[in-house]
Image (cartoon, rainbow, N blue to C red):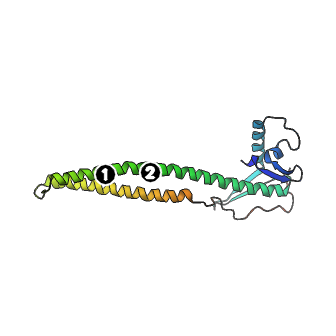
């Protein structure tokens, strides 16, 4: 996604795709687009430096020949990471919602069947005080209804939580210090 974005540079001019900036510049491309995408992606990856601290903070830097381009690339990288995470989260919560909805339907059917079995038992056996077997059967049927009711309730709560998570629009990447234009050239500038 990054290589399709457009950037302004002093060397190549305004609104040039990163693919163009990193591969053929102001000249005609000498390779096919698939090859150019691979070259641009590999070049971009080589430009990125990532440091990780044990506290869970990442430091990201990008070295280019123009400081403004470095800042723009970092900002774009953060936007793309955030968009990717939002899309991934939406897909996962959507899958979870579908699964929970299926389980709700199955559990509802099981619960209705268990309730119907308990009702039939009660209709057939009105006086069970003197029969331990019938009392045991009633308790078993009642317990099954209670358990399925609990499962059904839990699934409904999970469905509501998943629906809330699905529409949540939060940032998944927290930028502590935004990219800043370097004051001087770095030693590895190209």
Q: Secondary structure at mark 1?
A: helix
Measured from the top left, where is residue 14 in percent x and y?
A: 85, 52
CA separation in Å, label 2 and label 1 = 16 Å
Q: Quadrant of residue 185?
A: bottom right
Q: Is residue 179 left or right of residue 86?
A: right
Measured from the top left, where is residue 140 in percent x and y?
A: 23, 53
Q: Is residue 134 left or right of residue 166?
A: left
Sooner in the amino-acid sequence: mark 2 or mark 1: 2
Q: Nearer the viewer, residue 190 or 70?
A: 70
Q: Which residue is pictured at 87% across the width and 60% down the height? A: 184
Question: What crowding class fits label 2: few (fewer than 14 Cα within 10 Å), some (14-19), or many (20 or more)?
Answer: some
What residue is pinned by disc 2?
101
What residue is pinned by disc 1?
112
Q: Secondary structure at mark 2?
A: helix
Residue 188 in sight here: no
Residue 109 in sight here: yes
Q: Which residue is pictured at 59% across the width and 50% down the height? A: 88
The number of discs equals: 2
Q: Which residue is pictured at 48% across the width and 49% down the height? A: 98
Q: Is residue 59 left or right of residue 104?
A: right
Measured from the top left, where is residue 6 in percent x and y?
A: 79, 50
């Amino acid at each position: 996604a990054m290589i399709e974005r457009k950037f302004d540079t002093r060397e190549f001019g305004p609104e040039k795709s990163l693919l163009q900036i990193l591969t053929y510049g102001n000249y005609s491309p000498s390779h096919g687009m698939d090859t150019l995408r691979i070259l641009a992606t590999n070049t971009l990856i080589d430009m990125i430096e990532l440091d990780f601290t044990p506290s869970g903070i990442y430091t990201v830097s990008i070295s280019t020949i123009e400081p403004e381009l470095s800042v723009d690339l970092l900002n774009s990288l953060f936007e793309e990471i955030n968009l990717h995470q939002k899309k991934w989260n939406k897909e996962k919560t959507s899958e979870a919602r579908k699964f929970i909805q299926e389980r709700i339907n199955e559990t509802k059917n099981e619960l209705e069947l268990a309730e119907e079995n308990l009702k039939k038992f009660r209709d057939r056996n009105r006086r069970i005080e003197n029969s331990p077997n019938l009392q045991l059967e009633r308790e078993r049927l009642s317990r099954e209804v209670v358990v399925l009711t609990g499962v059904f309730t839990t699934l409904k709560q999970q469905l509501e939580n998943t629906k809330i998570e699905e529409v949540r629009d939060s940032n998944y990447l927290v930028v502590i210090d935004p990219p800043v234009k370097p004051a001087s050239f770095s030693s590895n500038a190209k």
